[in-house]
Amino acid sequence: MSQYIGALDQGTTSTRFILFDHSGEIVSSSQKEHSQIYPKPGWVEHNPKEIWQNCCLVIEETLTKSGIKAGDIAAMGITNQRETTLAWNPKTGEPWCNAIVWQDTRTQDVMERLKDDNREEEFRRITGLPLASYFSASKIQWMLNHVPGLREAAHRGEVCFGTVDSFILWNLSGGTEGGLFLTDVTNASRTLLMDLHTLHWDPHCLETFEIPVETLPRILQSIPGEPYGFSTPNGPFKGKVALAGILGDQQAALFGQACFHKGDCKNTYGTGAFLLMNTGQQSVVSSKGLITTVAYQQQGEKPFYALEGSVAVAGSLVQWFRDNLGIIKESHEIDSLAASVEDNGGVYFVPAFSGLFAPHWKPRARGALLGLTGYATAAHIARSVLESTAFQSLDIFDAMSLDSGISLKELRVDGGMTVSELLMQFQADLLNVPVIRPKIRETTALGAAYAAGLSVGFWKDQQELALQWKEDCRWTPAMEPDCRKEHLRLWQKALKRTLNWKE
């Protein structure tokens, strides 16, 4: 009998494969980082071949060290960095170019022109999204216009465009030998090309970006109720494993945190920070700069929707502090350095390296370190680095409460930055609600595993999954109201200094 569920978590900086048992506990895992490619300022790329090689490597390493075989795995789910866009030849399997990563801003001028033509409200009505280079549509258009021969190849049936989930699924299920070309509703909802209500590619959006519909994957449910297909024996599993669930990484974290009900909310602190709130089976149109997105869809059911706010720079700011300034040697050292001072010493860091995402959507903003005096030390700057993520998350949290009409009672958190006691306490102080971290912190991978497990009957239903969620640590607000008010005043003052810096 199959005893395990696998989850392949392909993220912005690394790829992980994790095996879970029936109680949702991690049995074995492996992780591998991949290269970040910066050809020009504002451009961010990944090598698709490296990503696929790493997917194979982490699967093989996990199976080898655990002794678990393909026949022991009931199913596998996929979760992935969203919006990052790839183009490959389905006849040869070769990528046409590097993947364009979600952080990339090369197409900002295209989006500005559409805004100038008063098209934003139209796209928001159809897709739930603002016009931003963050999403996949303009990345695909850029490839078609700039990769030699690509548009002609697309008309010959020699181009597949997809987010990372589609590329992985296609390769796992056979590649050039009949690989499945699919995506799920959560990833499709991040392209600026899917109608949020019909859950199909929208002809009007496709026409605007001049994208042939035949180059795009078929859209299916996140939790399909049966496998999409199976891995091939010559792949990394060396056997047949059901491929049975796909969720974009932030929706996967929402699902892994057991946020199954309207009003449930989570924040993932990773490369960026992503706060999502389940709004039930009714989409909520944001008037406060948030994104309306699909949370998940189970076979035979209407989709669940979510409001989302995205922070572009969170954990990556700690990496920048480590690598570009050289003040610390390891990322974890920032916590002890920041904790060596009582407060930020009046220093505020707005990390708008490639503009500000939700709720501001100011692509011309740039980073700024403000409030420096002769008193400030490296420790104060370190503290401002951590605090910046909490401030940015607060801006989203406030917008979400206004949009939804729901007063949020608590925030469930996950991601690498939740190891920072200082950051988590500061977040609780700013939000003035409890911040709760679960025992199993790999909630993104766990959400993908849950989706796959539900599809093949490994777990019965969401109620069973909700019972598995266990609290690990809770931070409760402890900041005086006047202190919180002053922090917020200075943060807003710093924020305004960064807007429209790039002309």
Image (tube, grey):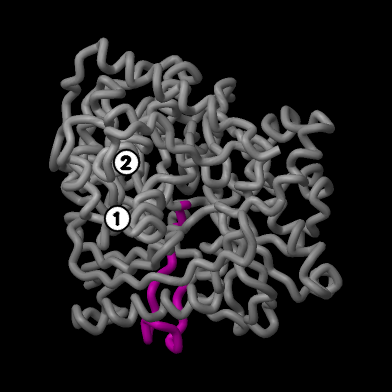
Where is the N terminus found, in terms of image quarters?
bottom left
Find residue 21 and report its horizontal and vertical position in percent.
20, 62
The front one of 407 and 320 is 320
The front one of 117 and 346 is 346
The front one of 501 and 428 is 501
Instruction: Mark 2: give few (<14), some (14-19) or many (20+) Cα within 10 Å.
Output: many
Kind of residue at disc 1: Ile
Left or right: 446, with 177 as reference point: left
Residues shaded magenta? 230-248
Quadrant of the rendered structure where residue 357 is?
top right
| Relative vertical location of residue 266 with respect to residue 20 in this rendering, above or below | above
- CA gap, disc 2 and disc 1: 10 Å
Find residue 6 and report its horizontal and vertical position in percent.
32, 66
Q: Are marks 2 and 1 in contact (CB under 8 Å)?
A: yes
Find residue 462 and report its horizontal and vertical position in percent.
30, 42
Q: Which residue is mark 1?
A: 327
Quadrant of the rendered structure where residue 348 is?
top left
Q: Which residue is mark 2?
A: 381
Magenta residue check for 458: no
Residue at 47%, 16% in the rendered image: 402
Kind of residue at disc 2: Ile
Residue 18 seen in this snapshot: yes
Instruction: Mark 1: give few (<14), some (14-19) or many (20+) Cα within 10 Å.
Output: some
Find residue 410 and report its horizontal and vertical position in percent.
26, 26
Residue at 59%, 62% in the rendered image: 182
Q: Secondary structure at mark 2?
A: helix
